[in-house]
Image (spheres, rainbow, N blue to C red):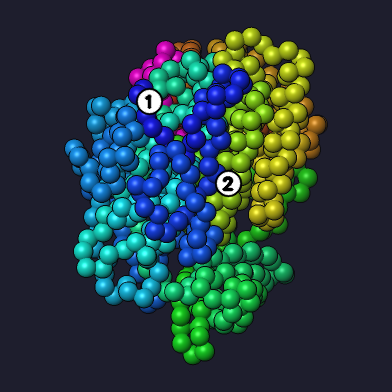
Amino acid sequence: MQQSSTIGDPAPSPLSVSRRDLLWASAMAGAISVAGAPAAAQSPSEPLPSPNSTSPGQGLLYPQRNETRDLIDLSGLWQFQMDPHGQGEAQGWFQALPSPRTIPVPCSWNDLFDDAHTYVGLAWYRIEVWVPSGWRGRRVILRVGSATYAARVWVNGSLVTEHLGGNLPFAVEITQQLAWERANVIAIAVENEPKPERVPPGPPPGGGGVLGVAAGFPGTTYDFFPYSGLHRQVWLCAVPAVHIDDITVVTTIEGGDGIVNLKVATVGAEAGTGKARLDGIEADLVFRAGMAEATLRVPGARLWSPQDPYLYRLTVTLTDQARVVDIYALDIGIRTVAVRGDQILLNGQPIKLTGFGKHEDFALSGRGLNLPVWIRDYELLRWIGANSYRTSHYPYPEEVMQLADQRGVLVINEIPAVGLNMADSQQLTEQRLMQSQSQLRELIARDKNHPSTIMWCVANEPVARAPNDEVPLSPALKQTAIDAGTQFFRRVYDEAHRLDGTRPVTLVGVGGGPREWHKPFDVICINRYYGWYGGLGGRLDQAAAALARDLDELHQSFARPIIITEFGTDALPGTHSLPPEMWSEEYQVEFLRRYLDVAAQRPFMAGMHVWAFADFRTVQGVGRAGSMNYKGVFTRDRRPKMAALFLRSRWVGA
């Protein structure tokens, strides 16, 4: 794996600190924007200045075309060039690439070019685009759906924004940088270097793998491939000078009525008026300090649920006396989510989750948006009888959340906090906390209005262990790491509830991990692999007994809903064994059967998510044949294994 110049990270400090801390200093958290900063004045490691007053607000509304708004989707063919030596900025690649090749956007670069197969370093994207003259007088915003992992953006030679963290959108106003009489040059530099202070963190020097499993190449702290690039659409959006920047919808139920509470934020004016309309019901909006609130009561509301995913069209209008200034419309579902004792309640009724952990992964497109695959996946979820999934281990595209709303699929929405080790230095832990909170803010800002999102997940399988497992931690260091994790997760939990008090918040724990870390969370989510990892491979009866004891102890300790968010085995497609043996399709079926039987005997179990929905690519190593994780019940190209047929018989009765 080639090393390269990276984005948003200052040079290493010469101070005498640990070898891991010497590698990188703190990374910039979130997106910052600037208008008119000349690129030549910025070095690759020099942070951008603070946002100026013309930057867009904090809203992440999905781009929309209507009578007041317009947009250009820049999906298509871009110029592309890798920059392993980090020379592009100094040589002005934001103006022209010296030796470009063609790449589709959105897409990962890794499966397209042989020399980029395992490359995660710096690479450049470039496109030229004309902006319609009819957009004059409006604000023009550049919106990037996902740049994994770190990105810097230039428009006509000016550095306009920088963002750290993949899988979530960022936006910047570029009105002042645009040319109206010629094509505009947009250049985006992206890198995905695995660094210890990032979230997910890179491995320590010489390290990698997940709890000793799947250590390989490229080095990661997680068991999936580090796909890189512009993974979602890049948009140019034209909005009025005074426009709706953000809408927050919270629904409750009173008797048979649905109550829709909304907050609307604007950019460009402190005062003004407007309307909110839903299903023939209307409320006035009066803006003060750029904010307005309203409540709409819907008599005899159709409540959103997996059985009836009914969506209402909410339209918000911003007016200047009789003149319509801006309009934004979105689909909302009226529903409530709550936790009572050891039950999860949807619209006041207990619900059990059946489904999967997934990955956004497919041949050639990698982690790039692939809507045909997603349509097929939703069809297969319906066929197999699943009502839910978790966005393991990062947020999924906005269009995918829209499909979940339309199809009544329940989603546990997870930030990319996988691979966290609380035994690392205090400095690294603080840097990761800042990045985790930034990602959480961005995720909630983006997905807060989706009825399908019923829970926020703040981490997957955090640990407290010695780096590289070189030597076990001493009892004192172990307790220090546990205490650090307790503080870390309490702060992230509090931030999630500060941002959104309407949904439960969870953390997904690993087998053998500190149980103390579950204490603040509303739902206990765990991953368990008795019968595959941990010494009980091939002994499914003993594995089932161990699982039963584990679940009973967890329920006795917490008396909250419990979801097993991962359980499963690798099954090589077409491999059969009688009696069932590990790696066979029969063994996968029997493993799943026992886990489902154990859960069915325990009323406090609130859900079971099989790992995984489909086979997916991971890194090269002796623990992963063909660089694949074969725990899917469907193959990577969505052909069913025996386990898929078994689950359909269990969940549908077919």
| Residue under the image location 41 percent in, 16 percent down | 621
| Residue under the image location 44 percent in, 38 percent down | 45
Instruction: Judge by depth and name the residue closer to the eye, 615 or 477.
Output: 477
Q: Are marks 2 and 1 in contact (CB under 8 Å)?
A: no
Residue 89 placement (x, y as % from top left): 32, 41
The residue where tag 2 is placed is: 438
10 Å neighbourhood of mark 2: few (<14), some, or many (≥20)? some
- Magenta span: predominant SS is loop
Instruction: Judge by depth and name the residue closer to the eye, 562 or 646.
Output: 562
The amino acid type, in three-letter code, at marker 2 is Ser
Instruction: Classify mark 1: helix, strand or loop.
Output: loop
Q: In the rendered view, tell whether residue 444 sits above or below residue 618.
A: below
Mark yes or no: residue 112 visible: yes
- In the rendered image, the quadrant that contains the N terminus is top left
Residue 579 placement (x, y as % from top left): 48, 12
Residue 273 placement (x, y as % from top left): 57, 82
Separation of disc 2 and disc 1 at Cα? Answer: 26 Å
Direction top: furthest residue: 471
| Segment tinted magenta in the rendering | 611-626
Could you say which quadrant of the image residue 470 lies in?
A: top right
| Residue under the image location 31 percent in, 52 percent down | 157
10 Å neighbourhood of mark 1: few (<14), some, or many (≥20)? some
The residue where tag 1 is placed is: 3
Q: In the rendered view, tell whether residue 147 sits above or below residue 406.
A: above
Residue 574 placement (x, y as % from top left): 35, 21
Instruction: Judge by depth and name the residue closer to the eye, 519 or 17.
Output: 17
Mark yes or no: residue 308 visible: no
Q: Is residue 196 magenta?
A: no
Could you say which quadrant of the image residue 488 lies in?
A: top right
Q: Nearer the viewer, mark 2 or mark 1?
A: 1
Instruction: Classify mark 2: helix, strand or loop.
Output: helix
